[in-house]
Image (spheres, rainbow, N blue to C red):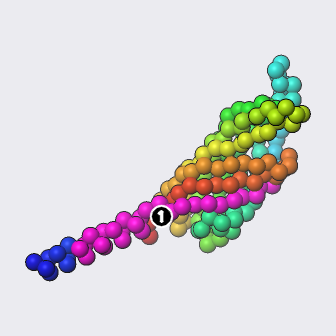
Amino acid sequence: MVGRRLVAVAGVALLALGASSAAAEPLKMTILYKLAEQTRYDIPLPDSEKHWVRIAKFTGTVEGGGPFDGAQATEMGFHDVFPGKGGIGAPLYHVLALKGGGTVTLRGDRELIVIPTGTDKPATVYFGHWRILGGTGAMTGIQGAGTYRISPLSPTESRLEFEGHFSPPKP
């Protein structure tokens, strides 16, 4: 009887260890992106004379983020800009080329909120959510999702701060 209980307790402990190793891991990483190339078009509109669109490619390096640390990051996407107004942006795609080989592709959906400050310059909050679309090589089968905040530093540089969780691929 004691032997059966011991086996049952050991079995539950092994199941718990197995479940915890398969659990999602927290993720926190930053990417400083610099504009690599773009095609931009000014499209004045009656309610937004400075409106413009572009297809752009940004490049950078991942800082932090566990297995993603040091990855070369490429962001590609469509930007539909209404200066001084908020809006929901088209998706951005982030391809992370990992130092040890393999890639991870994320899709980011974003929104810009403009908050009047009573001055010439309104405050902006630029945020969104992301999800992993898939991986290659050692990252085949990876999954994950979370939120991110975008901080434009200049017309050609942005800092993106990602938080969320991911489930590493099973060996």
Q: Please report the residue visible at 89 percent of the width from the left and 33 percent of the height from the top.
A: 120
Residue 16 spot, x, y in % from top left: 33, 68
Which residue occupies the foreground of this view, 52 or 83? 83
The part of the chain drawn in magenta is 9-36
Q: Count of labels shown?
A: 1
Image x and y of residue 167, in percent: 48, 60
Q: SS of the residue at dot 1? A: loop
Q: Residue furthest top?
A: 46
Residue 39 vs 66, above or below: the answer is above
Q: Is residue 1 above or below residue 118?
A: below
In the rendered image, residue 29 lying in the magenta stretch gets the answer yes
Residue shown at 72% from the left, 48% from the top: 150
**One can see residue 11 in this view:** yes
Residue beneath the point at 53% across and 57% down: 165
Please give left or right for residue 18 compared with residue 108 in the image: left
Pick the front one: 57 or 4: 4
Q: Specify whether residue 107 is in view.
A: no
Reading the image, the residue beneath label 1 is 169
Q: Name the image quarter holding the N terminus.
A: bottom left
Quadrant placement of the C terminus: bottom left
| Amino acid type shown at disc 1 | Pro
